[in-house]
């Protein structure tokens, strides 16, 4: 028996000589919605857009509709889906975003058909396949003719806007481990532009880390290798312990690695990454291993500590990030339980993407650490614990 | 050609079926003016790990990708946050056909997530007042929902009195 079905229907017709008209419907077990929009032909951008709910889940879903207007003027280029996700998907509604992406895809395909029909006026027996080949090679006389005709239409449209909204993030608070001694490092931070999802410059991260009293931070930008020289310059500039790491996406999720200089591009299997890290004598931590879903949790899925501990990824890592600033208390608690069950050390890191998030969680070491070699030695010793650094500080300041 | 004749039409259907052995089968089918394709994923509960993936892709002019090799990379991947980057990385996005296959894999995964969300939302009460409380509790329970969409943004009745940093 089906437990869920989603149907999407998108139809594209020509509205006038330079405009496509697109009607789209999304209908599934939870949502029913539709979008009507117009897209330019000679200047492929969204000209008008309207949408409505037929069925929705919450009493406040109607608030998403006005955000459709922010899509007006968006150009249908290779990055349009990404921009729709980031803008309409985050501020408005992900289901409208999903359907609008289908509309944009359909409009692009329909524009091809329209161009082919135009080209056939010059070359009557031009097959669609040949038209596509010629268009791809850019050598088509027919295409040149279309372009000149398009220019002759004198499209008055301005170039489409390309908006690049930045990622947003929220912090979370949780009681951490006890204890005030030791050397506290935030092992998980992201800076812009090394991580495009971050909104904090590396200088802002470091200044904030110093201000709140951390002893050091690790720069763990996504698949980005900081050079030794860059980090040394930062150390001298800020007179602070700054260490290099990397957050690498594998087929089994994100891993924090330390001591690996290799620039890993694309998605790597966890086994391949394990080999690279072992060869380099480095250290690998499963980052936010139970970062979960928005409306249900691992518990609701029936995931137990015992079954979770059997996941193959835990055979490949040296430690588990048990306190991460981007997941819920329950997910952190679950990661902590799994680490205990496996006998793996647990670390903490803020996963900061904003300066204000640095140090939400960190790792308290029993020894002072100034170099990468000392960090890896300390990580391998297992003599450390994750801490809720900011909340501990706040509690202390409040006299608790 | 008259303007009322469609230049392009697309029909995409994605469905999820719960199988007997605690697995979910998610299938995305696409039929448009140029394409006839399907992607099928099987995922195991409770960790939502992909067990198997298969697909067929026919397109008017795009060369079909080597689906067997591409899909063999998917088993082991977990359906969940961060999966989009992994799917694009594993399936690839440098060819139009691969982008479409990757999108269909993503649709299968989203359908699995929404099918499980449905289980939660079927518990929502009928009255407006109780509904507000139900969704408000959902945000309190999982603060990541806060500001994730217009319905859960500041100013919405569903997040009244909720401060994400506390």
Image: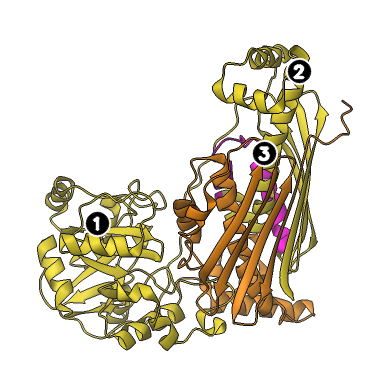
Tally of marks: 3
Are labels 1 and 2 assigned to the same chain?
A: yes
Task: Decide: is B94 above or below B79.
Answer: above
Are labels 3 and 2 assigned to the same chain?
A: yes
Q: CA distance from mark 1 to mark 2?
A: 66 Å
In depth, the one of B53 and A348 nearer the eye is B53
User: Disc 1 sits on a residue from what chain?
Assistant: A
**Does the magenta-highlighted stretch encompass residue A175?**
no
> What mark, if any, has residue B123 been given in the picture?
none
Task: Decide: is A1 above or below A115.
Answer: below
Q: Which residue is mark 2?
A: A125
What's the magenta bit mostly, secondary-structure-wise? helix
Q: CA distance from mark 3 to mark 2?
A: 38 Å
Question: Measuring 34% from the left and 67% from the top, which residue is drawn there?
Answer: A350
In depth, the one of B43 and A152 nearer the eye is B43
Q: Which residue is mark 3?
A: A72
Which element type, helix, strand or loop, lies under badge 3?
A: loop
Q: Find the magenta span and give its range.
A: A61-86
Q: Dot 3 surroundings within 10 Å: few (below 14), some, or many (20 or more)?
A: some
Say whether marks 1 and 2 touch (CB < 8 Å).
no
**Does the magenta-highlighted stretch encompass residue A66?**
yes
Residue A146 visible within the image: yes
Q: Image quadrant of residue A399?
A: bottom left
Q: Earlier in the sequence, mark 1 or mark 2?
A: 2
Left or right placement of residue A311 versus residue A3 in this view = left
Question: Measuring 79% from the left and 80% from the top, which residue is drawn there?
Answer: B126
Q: Earlier in the sequence, mark 1 or mark 3?
A: 3
Task: Decide: is A12 above or below A140.
Answer: below
Q: Which chain can be seen in orange?
A: B
Q: Dot 1 surroundings within 10 Å: few (below 14), some, or many (20 or more)?
A: many
Q: Which chain can be seen in yellow?
A: A
Q: Which residue is mark 1?
A: A206
């Amino acid at each position: 028996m089906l437990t869920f079905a989603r149907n999407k229907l998108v139809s594209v017709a020509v509205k006038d000589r330079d405009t496509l008209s697109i009607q789209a419907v999304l209908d599934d077990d939870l949502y029913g919605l539709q979008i009507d929009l117009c897209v330019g032909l000679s200047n492929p951008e969204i000209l008008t857009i309207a949408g409505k709910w037929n069925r929705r889940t919450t009493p406040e879903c109607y608030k998403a509709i006005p955000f459709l207007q922010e899509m007006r003027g968006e150009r249908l280029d290779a990055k349009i889906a990404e921009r729709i996700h980031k803008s309409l998907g985050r501020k408005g509604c992900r289901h409208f975003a999903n359907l609008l992406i289908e509309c944009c895809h359909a409009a692009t395909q329909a524009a091809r058909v329209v161009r082919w029909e135009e080209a056939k006026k010059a070359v009557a027996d031009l097959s669609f396949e040949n038209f596509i080949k010629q268009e791809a090679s850019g050598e088509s006389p027919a295409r040149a003719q279309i372009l000149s005709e398009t220019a002759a239409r004198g499209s008055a449209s301005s170039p489409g806007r390309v908006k690049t909204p930045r990622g947003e993030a929220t912090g979370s608070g949780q009681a951490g481990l006890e204890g005030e001694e030791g050397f506290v490092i935030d092992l998980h931070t992201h800076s812009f532009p090394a991580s495009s999802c971050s909104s904090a410059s590396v200088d802002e991260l470091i200044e904030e880390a110093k201000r709140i009293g951390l002893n050091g931070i690790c720069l763990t930008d996504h698949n980005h290798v900081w050079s030794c020289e860059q980090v040394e310059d930062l150390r001298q500039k800020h007179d602070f312990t700054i260490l290099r790491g990397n957050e690498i996406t594998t087929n089994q999720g994100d891993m924090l690695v330390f001591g690996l200089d290799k620039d890993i591009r694309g998605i790597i299997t966890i086994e391949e990454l394990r080999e690279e890290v072992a060869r380099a004598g480095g250290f690998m931590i499963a980052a936010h291993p139970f970062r979960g879903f928005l409306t249900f949790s691992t518990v609701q899925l029936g995931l137990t500590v015992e079954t979770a501990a059997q996941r193959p990824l835990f055979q490949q890592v040296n430690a588990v990030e048990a306190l991460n600033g981007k997941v819920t208390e329950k997910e952190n608690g679950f990661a902590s339980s799994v680490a205990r069950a496996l006998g793996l050390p647990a670390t903490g890191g803020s996963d900061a993407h904003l300066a204000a998030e640095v140090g939400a969680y960190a790792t308290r070491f029993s020894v002072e650490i100034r170099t990468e070699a000392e960090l890896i030695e300390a990580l391998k010793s297992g003599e450390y614990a994750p801490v809720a650094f900011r909340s501990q500080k706040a509690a202390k300041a409040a006299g608790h | 050609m008259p303007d009322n004749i469609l230049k392009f039409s697309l029909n995409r259907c994605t469905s999820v079926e719960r199988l007997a052995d605690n697995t979910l089968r998610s299938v995305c089918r696409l039929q448009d003016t140029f394409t006839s394709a399907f992607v099928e994923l099987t995922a195991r509960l409770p960790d939502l790990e992909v067990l198997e993936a298969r697909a067929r892709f026919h397109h008017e002019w795009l060369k079909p990708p080597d689906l067997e090799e591409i899909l063999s990379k998917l088993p082991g991947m977990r359906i969940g946050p961060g999966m989009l980057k992994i799917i694009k990385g594993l399936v690839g996005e440098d060819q139009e056909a691969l982008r479409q296959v990757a999108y269909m894999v993503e649709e299968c995964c989203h359908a699995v997530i929404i099918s499980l969300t449905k289980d939660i939302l079927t518990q929502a009460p009928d009255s407006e007042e109780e509904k507000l409380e139900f969704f408000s509790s959902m945000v309190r329970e999982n603060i990541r929902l806060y500001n994730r969409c217009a319905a859960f943004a500041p100013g919405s009745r569903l997040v009244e009195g909720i401060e994400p940093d506390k």
